[in-house]
């Protein structure tokens, strides 16, 4: 009765074939002078992942981000984007910096121009927008509900609107990974919630791959699917379900905090 049908096994294997990772870190270490601030970091990012990168102040989150963006030399290890080596990250990572635009109301750039900068960044030589670029900019403005603001000066917008413009700029070049650094730290709670809603939709509907760096484990626990917890080395990397079941993590955070970070996952 329990005999396995011979055809079942190969099918299961086929389905289980994982897609190649978009980003692979192998044994990455980084030093400032003689001080090592990241030690032996290794993990993979796959298409459609939504990974929160958390850790206390000084744990190396910014350093890790800079390393992924190719802005820092590695003292050992390597970083691979897709199948190739990390020579250039041009076009591969869309980066959204921490603070909303330094809100000078008179800064002359308009929303449409700021978003268009995301198409120019990957171009070499003469930099101008072709019709494909213009279409991509218009489509992105529409997607992020910015069409009505397209001719407004960025400095005249609210913090939440500015952050959406910068998100549009980061996405308009079709990066394989979106990397966000504490993207909501300058936003009030309601706008923050809206911003995370947009990220959730991008991830669910478009399979946008997201790396979200934050010191706020509460937000990361609420919105992301996987956690990378860092303290100069990786203390945890896995799904939230694994985190919530981990006795090592109970010991590290205490059961109350672990429960608080996990409420969405244990009640899902
Ligand atoms: P986080 O973003 O998690 O707060 P950082 O990556 O900024 O952590 O910093 C990790 C460690 O590296 C800290 O001890 C910090 O003081 C140190 N550090 C960061 N940047 C530099 C630098 N440019 N030169 C020397 N030390 C640095």
Image (tube, rainbow, N blue to C red):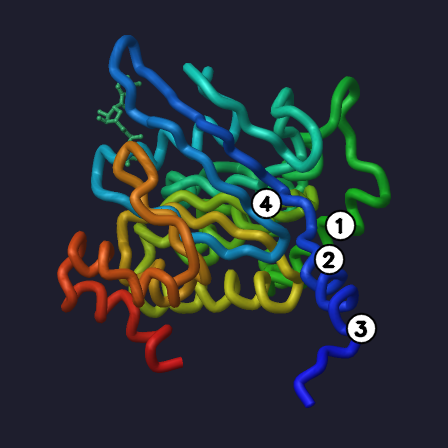
Badge 2 density bin: few <14, some 14–19, many ≥20, Cα 10 Å? some
How far across and down, in percent of the image, does residue 174 sit?
69, 46
Q: Secondary structure at mark 1?
A: helix
- Using residue 87 as the reference point, say whether residue 266 is left or right of it: left
Q: Kindly check if marks 2 and 1 are in contact, taking CB atoms under 8 A apart as contact.
A: yes
Circle 2 is placed at which residue position?
139
Pick whichever of labels 2 and 3 is earlier in the sequence: 3
Circle 4 is placed at which residue position?
177
- Which quarter is ligand 1 in? top left
Q: CA distance from mark 2 to mark 3?
A: 49 Å
Q: Residue at x 67, y 37 (%)?
A: 82
Name the residue furthest bottom: 1
Q: Is mark 3 within 8 Å of ligand 1?
A: no
Q: Secondary structure at mark 2?
A: helix
Q: Residue at x 50, y 44 (%)?
A: 179
Q: Secondary structure at mark 4?
A: strand
Q: CA distance from mark 2 to mark 1?
A: 5 Å
Query: Foreground mark, 4 or 3?
Result: 3
**Nearer to the camera, 13 or 210:** 13
How far across and down, in percent of the image, does residue 11 sit?
78, 68
The circle drawn on residue 136 is: 1
Q: Kindly check if marks 2 and 4 are in contact, taking CB atoms under 8 A apart as contact.
A: no
**Residue 75 occupies quadrant:** top left
Camera sees residue 90 = yes
The circle drawn on residue 11 is: none
Name above or below for residue 92 compared with residue 196: above
Pick whichever of labels 4 and 3 is earlier in the sequence: 3
Query: Foreground mark, 2 or 3?
Result: 3
**Nearer to the camera, 267 or 147:** 267
Pick whichever of labels 1 and 3 is earlier in the sequence: 3
Q: Secondary structure at mark 3?
A: loop
Q: CA distance from mark 4 to mark 3?
A: 40 Å
């Amino acid at each position: 009765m329990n005999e396995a049908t011979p055809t079942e096994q190969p099918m299961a294997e086929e389905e289980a074939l994982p897609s190649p990772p978009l980003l692979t870190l192998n044994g990455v270490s980084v030093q400032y002078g003689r001080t090592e601030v990241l030690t032996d970091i290794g993990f993979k990012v796959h298409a459609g992942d939504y990974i929160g990168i958390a850790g206390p102040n000084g744990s190396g989150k910014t350093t890790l981000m800079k390393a992924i963006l190719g802005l820092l030399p590695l003292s050992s290890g390597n970083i691979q984007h897709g199948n190739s080596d990390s020579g250039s990250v041009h076009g591969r990572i869309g980066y959204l910096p921490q603070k909303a635009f330094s809100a000078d109301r008179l800064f002359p750039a308009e929303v449409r121009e700021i978003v268009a900068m995301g198409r120019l960044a990957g171009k070499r030589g003469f930099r101008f927008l072709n019709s494909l670029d213009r279409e991509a900019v218009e489509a992105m403005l529409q997607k992020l509900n910015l069409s009505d603001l397209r001719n407004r000066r960025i400095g005249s917008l609210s913090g939440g609107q500015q952050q959406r413009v910068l998100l549009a700029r980061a996405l308009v070049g079709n990066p394989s990974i979106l990397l966000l650094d504490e993207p909501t730290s300058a936003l009030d709670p309601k706008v923050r919630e809206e911003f995370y809603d947009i990220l959730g939709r991008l991830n669910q509907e478009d399979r946008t791959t997201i790396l979200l760096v934050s010191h706020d484990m509460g937000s990361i626990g609420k919105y992301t699917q996987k956690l990378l917890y860092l303290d100069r080395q990786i203390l945890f990397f896995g799904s939230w379900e694994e985190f919530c079941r981990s006795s090592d993590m109970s010991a590290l955070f205490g059961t109350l905090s672990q429960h608080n970070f996990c409420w969405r996952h244990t009640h899902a």
